[in-house]
Amino acid sequence: MKISIKQYSQTLFDLTDGKSEQDVLAVLKNFAEQLKRDGQLKNAGKIMEKFSDLHDAANGMVVAEVVVSKEIATDELEKVREFVAKKYAAKEVELKIVIDEKIQGGIVIRVGDEVIDGSVAMQLKRLKNILSK
């Protein structure tokens, strides 16, 4: 039976949750050795990324990628942070700002696998689809 990246990540999270720093280091050492035995060291980065997502979720932290066409004002960023915190019941929200002129305006918010697309480009695409029917 092949173990998925998600399963490895969940296992690592379960083994480290609530442990002291010294205990976590011991778990990580053993976990890395197990990955080596399983031939999964190549996936260590992906496993740690998923582990980080699990850790953040368990601690009320959300990382949101915010795509805009140009710099966004601080007060607008705070509104985005409040929206994300409320939507995901997060205690803490980290915003990663990406500037992409292709969206032509508006905003795209990505949290995990979910995308909230309020870009002008998407609105124009939706309008085109409606008009072409």
Image (cartoon, rainbow, N blue to C red):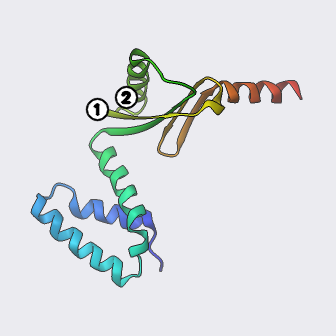
Q: Is residue 33 above or below residue 128?
A: below
Q: Type of residue at label 1? A: Lys
| Tag 2–tag 1 contact (CB < 8 Å) | yes
Q: Please tell me which residue lies in front, 130 or 123.
A: 123
Quarter of the image for residue 48 reads bottom left
Residue 120 image point, x, y percent: 67, 24
**Residue lying furthest top:** 75
Residue 72 image point, x, y percent: 47, 21
Total marks shown come to 2
**Residue lying furthest right:** 133
Q: Tell which circle, 2 or 1, labels the residue nearer the N-terminal end.
A: 2
Q: Secondary structure at mark 2?
A: helix
Q: Is residue 88 above or below residue 49?
A: above
Tell me the tag on residue 91: 1
Q: Is residue 120 left or right of residue 12?
A: right
Quarter of the image for residue 74 reads top left
Give the crowd class for mark 2: few <14, some 14-19, many >=20 residues within 10 Å: many
Give the crowd class for mark 1: few <14, some 14-19, many >=20 residues within 10 Å: few
Q: Which residue is mark 2?
A: 85
Q: Secondary structure at mark 1?
A: loop
Q: Please tell me which residue lies in front, 101 or 112.
A: 101
Rendered residue at 47%/45% (across/down): 112
Q: Is residue 101 left or right of residue 88?
A: right
Q: Is residue 11 above or below residue 65?
A: below
Q: Please tell me which residue lies in front, 103 or 35.
A: 103
Q: Type of residue at label 2? A: Ala
Alpha carbon of mark 2 to alpha carbon of mark 1: how far? 7 Å
Rendered residue at 39%/82% (across/down): 38
**Residue lying furthest bottom:** 37
